Amino acid sequence: MTGFYTLFYKEWLRFWKVSVQTVLAPVLTALLYLLVFGHALRGRVEVFPGVDYIAFLAPGLAMMSVLQNSFANASSSLMQSKMTGNIVFVLLPPLSHREFFLAYLLAAMARGVVVGAGVLLATLWFTEVSVVHPWWVLLFGVCGSAVMGALGIVAGIHSDKIDQLAAFTNFIILPLTFLSGVFYSIQSLPAFWQAASHLNPVFYMIDGFRYGFFGASDTSPWLSLAIVGGSFIALSWLTLGLLKSGYKLRQ
């Protein structure tokens, strides 16, 4: 376990040493979304009965920050290590592919959860956010960050250049997170786009997380949990296979 802990600690320090960039900046970005959309739509939109729009928006922004930062931490770390060549110092020690996976995954989850908690704490200055089912909040926060952390590892392994990773972020991660119901309920969409939203796994992460706050959601939290859990199992299987084969790392 010494090698696993050392690699995890190294990944933790990698983002924590520059916390202004990796933690405070995403929190500020989320607050800007809250202020802009909250000011524009407050009083005009009531998604759930009796729930203020800013209160509705806060959990969605927090979860979006969790997902984006979990992905960014794992993918950027591997990408930078490959470009600078210091990935060799991670591959040479007698670490198993499982230890490698868990260290990068847990560090990505840690950054995502820290940023998400920071967003929630910051929104308390603007609105009162109640938590009806705290265990659902914790469960979806952990599972969602795990899914995006695993996806970030896959993206970091596959990408050889910064522009490849940027394309992955801009054309996959951002559309999935922004079109997942962060700023709206999918019940307000036309039938076609409601059906399309149900094909987006990030929708279930956002919806299940928000259920923990209000006890209301667009779909069953158990269905959301099953889809999020299945996504994590599939991505974990893929990631462990890539790491075991040495794809674009040892080859």
Image (tube, rainbow, N blue to C red):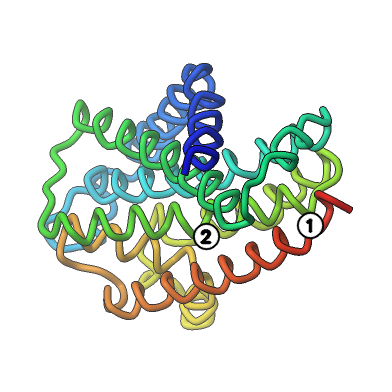
Residue in the image at 26% along x and 51% along y: 56
Instruction: Identify the residue shown where x is 30% and y is 73%.
Output: 218
- Under mark 1, the amino acid is Gly
Q: Nearer the viewer, residue 212 or 138?
A: 138
Residue 144 placement (x, y as % from top left) = 42, 57
Q: Which disc number belongs to residue 246?
A: 1
Q: CA distance from mark 2 to mark 1?
A: 34 Å
Give the percent coordinates (x, y) of residue 37: 39, 40
81 displayed left or right of 140:
right
Within-10-Å neighbours for mark 2: few <14, some 14–19, many 20+: some
Q: Nearer the viewer, mark 2 or mark 1?
A: 1
Task: State the SS at label 1.
Answer: loop
Which image quadrant is residue 222 in?
bottom left
- The residue at which mark 2 appears reads as 179
- Residue shown at the point (39%, 63%) measured from the top left: 205
Q: Secondary structure at mark 2?
A: loop
Q: Is residue 208 left or right of residue 169?
A: left
The image position of residue 66, as x and y in percent, is 42, 45
120 lies above or below 171: above
Q: Is residue 102 above or below residue 39?
A: below
- Classed neighbour count for the residue bearing mark 1: other residues with Cα under 10 Å, few (<14), some (14–19), many (≥20): some
User: Hey, what amino acid is under mark 2?
Assistant: Leu
Left or right, 22 with respect to 121, comes to: right
Q: Is residue 178 visible?
A: no
Q: Which mark is residue 56?
A: none
Say which quarter of the image contains residue 14: top right
